[in-house]
Image: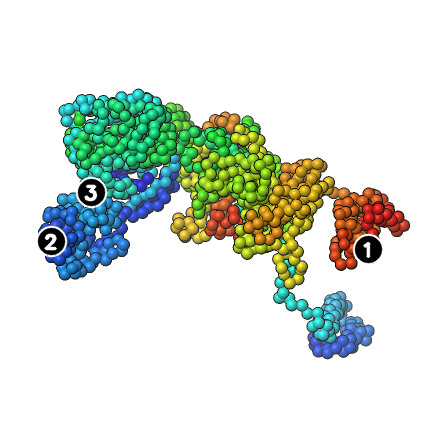
């Protein structure tokens, strides 16, 4: 809502500057976004009169104008033709500055000297008229008067950013009431008493309202013998300050009233209303209407229309129809001022994507009493500005049940909620300034809320009014008191944070990617239609395919990040994300889906970054597995199984499923070379995704501690050469079985394939830790066990490495 | 006697300083501290001193001995080191070489800020609660006093899954979920961090972002309590000089409602580009819990009151770290993430 400060002053004197008022309004709940000066800087442009018009001797399309500006007369060469002798015009005298900026000086135009310029509206910064049309001023404009002063350029516009509850301020008069509440000053209401002729409106038109719920009040006046032309300049200027484009006198007046009272009006060309009857009804299912914007709209019974005796002529409260539009030929108008059901208007405006100044006001609800005032005020302005005959009376079909709400408030409760002491007198003073009627009833105050403030229905609403006008800045500060509660975050939630600590300590950076997914990215992972992850939950109204579904895996999010970073030459990347994926129980969704938390890692490049001192190793499968082991160690989960099995998007022989107690925790794997190709990944990437809930379920979130061993350990190394197809897991299992309880740790410290090792074999070196809890082990004991272990390994086909 | 001790000290120090090698130093040591050394000799004449002065002199003499022993030791080190110049040169390292790279990643800035917010409110006695990202219309709107077809719904454009299910547009539904579960037990004091989604996508809006909701409900929670809590939060988050300003506003689920500004952290309230010359930065919305909301969640709005607030984590992170572009949070660009530690 744009509020002209000068216009506002017609209704109330704020007693302060526009900036001060803006600050005060903002701090009391009507946010003023900005205050802007209206109109550009203009100097040297004054009111002149056309004294003489002569053709240019050399150019047919130019005219020589003599323009008098009080005592001085300027000879001006002009390209426009819309002026006649006697017209008042805007003369840019030599030395004038116009917006642009543009400096006007004396010049010779095709052999004739031109001292200045006659201005079009656009040349002085107004969005009025045509480019090649001189701005014609009012006849009574005083000669020599600066045009910026005449047109009210010395004004400031307050841009209100209204919250949905304060749509009352979509009308200047209600803004004035708000200023009154701030200042205590009086509101002056404009006159609304049109002179009427003897002919009755009942003889000129009929109104029938078929749907009382959707149209609780409909009023109409008829004005005859009018002539449609441009509005006087003062009215056009006011509309410009409100941000509305002037059109013609009748339409401008209806817009002016809408701005003044917040009550939208509509004018119909009565001669085009069949049978001179207006019927407010729901549309039929096969009806159509061409609206003012020239678009043909298909209607049905959800839409409330204004119809004449035969067809719809307007979408009620949203937009009029083309057939009954006011044109230059209109001589007789029916002016509608009505109240419609907000919800119905909102639905219609949304359905046809026709949000308008009118629908915006109707869908927030208009004041049913103001309907009549606005109607009469419009008739007065029409008779003053347009002329014509205002027929006697108003047709008023009124089913409105709106009555001012009564709200009881207790000063005690106001103070209890606010946590302070505002005196009863002060509360009453504030309510008076709001122009709310009050009746004191012992401790309570009964407040009668005027219809212009439909947002106020409860005691809490009054509390807010009191608080905001008393000043939020005067409210003291305190802290809640009350019982202590156990308020640490749950262990499981804290585990997430611990995991993040472990992963960042391992060099991984936390990522956050969108919870949306483009389903194509799942196809790009080569997931089959049967894969559970393909059952994504679709979003009904995405902006683009990127938000078309909810993610079922974080992998695409991290692959996108990897790709982005590779493109920006960050080649060595360790990334992770802990976040939800969304699993539908059924599609389409009937109930809330499972939101399952996943831990996802992705690694590529080398670790650490190439440097002068420490060797860099590829961030591969084992790097990621190592990090996972750190997590599992911390959580004291030791019964984990790795099964050589791949995902559709991972390398067939470099992937593992991770299993705990027979349940699938997740997977690790290098991205399949072909998938890497599809994703433009120019280097190997290893990913891992595991289930947080299962991890948390199996974890000792609080570590269990065993006593530190009292007796020393004996450590023996063992270097083996074994066939390549014997897995490390197999070797370890065999050693542990043969080693018995005193073999407490088996650690691989070297692996070698190549020279000196026969084809098809590899060499593994283990460090074995023996320890008994209750006594020191003897060498003999350890040697016996080591022999058992060796024998078990030999039977697998292993030999000792020399 | 004391005078003599002082002279001896001075003299000895001079001799120690002048010693050219270890042998010379050893000789000097014997001559001063040895059995027949100067100090011993001096002490032998203690008998000539008045009896009442003897303890004082004795103490001074012992101090001197300790002091000189240290001085000899220091000089010894010096002379020994000086003799190993070659060895040191051989063992020289270039200390300007970079250190051995260790591995260290970082949490996402939004996690860092969320953890900080959590810490502050946990310290104030609030509990952390969570709710689902996909919500019902009831929890996201209806129960929060946004009736169907109400213009207030235009304030937040939603992504719908079905007509009844949507991506939550704010963390406020957690208020209802928590109260429903707990009613009529008091007090309720929670914060609820999480992802939220709005159908907006431009330079200053992301379709997904993060909020932290706060809610306190008890028999006598006041607007002043809200103001105090938020002031404390602002100071813990942005520094103890912070001021806050509450402006009346509108949210369907609070009444009275307030937007909360903090004094601009860039210009300390003087006015700059970041705060559009106002000196203030809007950081959160808040208010007293609307009676309809309390009732629907199972509390008697005549007997209990509450306050609620909601803040955007991105907004706070941007202010705190001086981040200019909202999109940085979701591109996972390492050149951005590594600025939080490498």
Q: Is residue A414 above or below residue B7?
A: above
Mark 2 element type = strand
Where in the figure is residue A783, as x and y percent of width and height? 88, 50
The coloring applied to the image is rainbow
Work out whether mark 1 precedes mark 2 in sequence or the reverse, and give the earlier one. 2
Asked if marks 1 and 2 touch (Cβ < 8 Å), the reply is: no
Quadrant in which residue A199 is drawn: top left
Q: Is residue B179 above or below residue B197?
A: above
Whether residue B35 is visible to the viewer of this picture, yes or no, is yes
What residue sits right under mark 3 in the picture? A233
Q: Which disc number belongs to residue A801?
A: 1
Whether residue A778 is visible to the viewer of this picture, yes or no, is no
Where in the figure is residue B47, as x and y percent of width and height? 79, 72
Work out whether mark 3 precedes mark 1 in sequence or the reverse, and give the earlier one. 3
Q: Quadrant of the C terminus of chain B?
A: bottom right
- Name the side, left or right, on which A272 lies relative to B56: left
How packed mark 2 is, by other alpha carbons closer than 10 Å (few <14, some 14-19, many 20 or more), is some
Quadrant in which residue B44 is drawn: bottom right
Q: CA distance from mark 3 to mark 1?
A: 105 Å
Q: Is residue A549 above or below residue A611?
A: above
Where in the figure is residue A414, as x and y percent of width and height? 43, 31
Mark 1 element type = loop
Is residue A797 or residue B5 the one in the foreground?
A: A797
Asked if marks 3 and 2 touch (Cβ < 8 Å), the reply is: no
Residue lying at the far right of the rendered structure = A780
Badge 3: chain ID = A
Where in the figure is residue A237, as x and y percent of width and height? 23, 43
Q: Residue at x 23, y 56 (%)?
A: A97
Work out whether mark 3 precedes mark 2 in sequence or the reverse, and give the earlier one. 2
């Amino acid at each position: 809502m744009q509020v002209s400060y000068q216009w506002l002053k017609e209704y109330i004197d704020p007693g302060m500057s526009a900036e001060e008022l803006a600050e005060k309004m903002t701090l009391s709940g009507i946010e003023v976004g900005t205050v802007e000066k209206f109109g550009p800087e203009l100097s040297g442009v004054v009111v002149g009169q056309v004294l003489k018009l002569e053709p240019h001797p050399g150019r047919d399309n130019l005219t020589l104008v003599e323009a008098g500006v009080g005592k001085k007369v300027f000879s001006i060469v002009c390209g426009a033709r819309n002026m006649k002798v006697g017209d008042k015009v805007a003369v840019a005298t030599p030395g004038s500055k116009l917006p642009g900026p543009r400096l006007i000086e004396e010049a010779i135009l095709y052999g004739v000297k031109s001292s200045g310029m006659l201005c079009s509206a656009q040349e002085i910064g107004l969005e009025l008229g045509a480019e090649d049309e001189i701005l014609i001023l009012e006849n009574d404009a005083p000669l020599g008067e600066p045009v910026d002063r005449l047109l009210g350029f010395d004004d400031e516009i307050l841009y209100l950013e209204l919250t949905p509850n304060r749509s009352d301020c979509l009308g200047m008069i209600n803004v004035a009431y708000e200023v009154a509440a701030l200042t205590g000053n009086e509101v002056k209401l404009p006159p609304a008493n049109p002179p009427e002729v003897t002919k009755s409106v009942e003889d000129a038109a009929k109104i029938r309202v078929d749907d009382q719920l959707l149209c609780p009040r409909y009023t109409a006046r008829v004005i005859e013998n009018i002539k449609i032309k441009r509005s006087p300049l003062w009215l056009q200027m006011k509309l410009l300050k409100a941000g509305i484009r002037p059109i013609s006198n009748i339409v401008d007046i209806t817009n002016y009233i809408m701005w003044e009272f917040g009550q939208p009006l509509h004018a119909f060309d009565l001669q085009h209303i069949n049978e001179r009857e207006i019927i407010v009804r729901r549309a039929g299912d096969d009806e159509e209407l061409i609206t003012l914007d020239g678009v043909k709209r298909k209607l049905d019974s959800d839409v409330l229309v204004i119809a004449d005796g035969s067809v719809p002529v307007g979408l009620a409260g949203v937009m009029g129809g083309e057939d009954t539009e006011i044109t230059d030929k209109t001589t007789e108008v029916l002016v509608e001022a009505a109240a419609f059901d907000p919800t119905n208007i909102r639905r219609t405006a949304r359905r046809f994507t026709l949000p308008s100044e009118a629908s915006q006001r109707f869908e927030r609800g208009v004041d049913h009493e103001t309907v009549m005032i606005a109607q009469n005020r419009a008739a007065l302005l029409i008779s003053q500005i347009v002329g014509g005959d205002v027929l006697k009376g108003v047709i008023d079909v009124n089913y409105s049940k709106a009555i001012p709400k009564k709200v009881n408030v207790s000063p005690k409760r106001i103070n209890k909620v606010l946590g302070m002491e505002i005196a009863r007198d002060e509360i009453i003073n504030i309510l008076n300034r709001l122009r709310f009627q009050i009746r004191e009833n012992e401790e309570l105050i009964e407040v009668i809320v005027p219809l212009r403030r439909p947002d106020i229905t409860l005691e809490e609403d009054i509390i807010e009014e009191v608080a905001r006008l008393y000043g939020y800045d005067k409210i003291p500060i305190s802290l809640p008191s009350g019982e202590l509660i156990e308020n640490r975050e749950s262990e499981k939630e804290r585990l997430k944070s611990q995991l993040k600590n472990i992963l960042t300590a391992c060099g991984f950076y936390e990522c956050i990617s969108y919870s949306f997914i483009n389903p194509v990215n799942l196809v790009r992972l080569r997931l089959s239609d049967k894969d559970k992850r393909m059952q994504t939950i679709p979003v009904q109204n995405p902006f683009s395919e990127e938000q078309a579904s909810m993610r079922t895996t974080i992998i695409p999010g991290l692959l996108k990040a990897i790709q982005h970073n590779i493109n920006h030459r960050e080649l060595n990347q360790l990334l992770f994300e802990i976040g939800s994926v969304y699993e539908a129980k059924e599609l389409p969704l009937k109930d809330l889906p499972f939101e399952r938390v996943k831990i996802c890692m992705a690694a590529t490049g080398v670790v650490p970054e190439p440097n002068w001192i420490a060797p860099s190793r590829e961030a591969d499968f084992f790097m990621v597995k190592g990090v996972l082991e750190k997590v599992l160690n911390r959580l004291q989960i030791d019964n984990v199984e790795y099964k050589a099995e791949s995902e559709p998007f991972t390398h067939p022989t470099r992937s593992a499923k991770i299993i705990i107690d027979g349940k699938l925790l997740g997977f690790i794997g290098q991205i399949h070379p072909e998938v890497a190709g599809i994703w433009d990944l120019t280097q190997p990437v290893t990913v891992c995704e595991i289930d947080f809930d299962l991890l948390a379920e199996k974890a000792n979130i609080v570590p269990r501690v065993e006593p530190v061993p009292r007796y020393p350990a004996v450590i023996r190394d063992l270097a083996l050469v074994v066939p390549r197809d014997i897995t490390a897991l197999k070797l370890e299992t065999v050693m542990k079985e043969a080693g018995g309880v005193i073999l407490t740790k088996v650690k691989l410290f070297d692996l070698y394939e190549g020279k000196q090792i026969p084809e098809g074999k590899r060499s593994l070196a283990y460090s074995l830790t023996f320890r008994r809890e209750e006594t020191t082990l003897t060498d003999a004991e350890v040697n016996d066990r080591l022999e058992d272990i060796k024998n078990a390994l030999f039977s697998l086909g292993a030999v000792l490495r020399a | 006697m004391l005078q003599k001790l002082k002279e001896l000290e001075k003299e000895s120090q001079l001799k120690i300083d002048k010693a050219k090698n270890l042998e010379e130093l050893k000789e000097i040591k014997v001559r001063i501290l040895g059995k027949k050394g100067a100090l011993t000799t001096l002490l032998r004449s203690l008998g000539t001193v008045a009896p009442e002065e003897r303890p004082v002199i004795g103490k001074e003499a012992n101090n001197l001995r300790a002091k000189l022993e240290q001085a000899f030791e220091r000089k010894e080190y010096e002379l020994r080191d000086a003799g190993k110049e070659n060895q040191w040169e051989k063992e020289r390292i270039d200390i300007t070489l970079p250190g051995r790279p260790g591995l260290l990643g970082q949490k996402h800035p939004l996690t860092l800020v969320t953890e900080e917010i959590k810490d502050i409110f946990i310290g104030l006695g609030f509990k952390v609660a969570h709710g689902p990202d996909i919500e019902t219309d009831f929890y996201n709107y209806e129960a929060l006093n946004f009736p169907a077809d109400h213009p207030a719904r235009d304030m937040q454009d939603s992504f719908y899954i079905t007509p009844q299910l949507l991506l939550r547009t704010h963390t406020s539904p957690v208020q209802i979920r928590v109260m429903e579960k707990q009613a009529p037990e008091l007090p309720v004091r929670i914060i609820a961090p999480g992802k939220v989604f709005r159908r907006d996508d431009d330079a200053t809006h992301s379709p997904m972002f993060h909020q932290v909701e706060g809610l306190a409900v008890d028999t006598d929670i006041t607007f002043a309590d809200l103001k105090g809590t938020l002031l404390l939060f602002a100071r813990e988050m942005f520094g103890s000089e912070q001021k806050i300003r509450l402006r009346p506003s509108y949210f369907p689920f609070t009444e009275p409602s307030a937007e909360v500004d903090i004094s601009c952290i860039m210009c300390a309230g003087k006015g700059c580009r970041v705060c559009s010359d106002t000196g203030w930065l809007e950081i959160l919305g808040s208010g007293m819990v609307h009676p309809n909301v309390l009732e629907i969640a199972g509390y008697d709005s005549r007997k209990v009151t509450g306050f609620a607030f909601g803040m955007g984590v991105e907004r706070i992170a941007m202010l705190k770290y001086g981040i200019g572009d909202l999109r940085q949070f979701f591109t996972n660009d390492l050149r951005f993430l590594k600025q939080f530690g490498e």
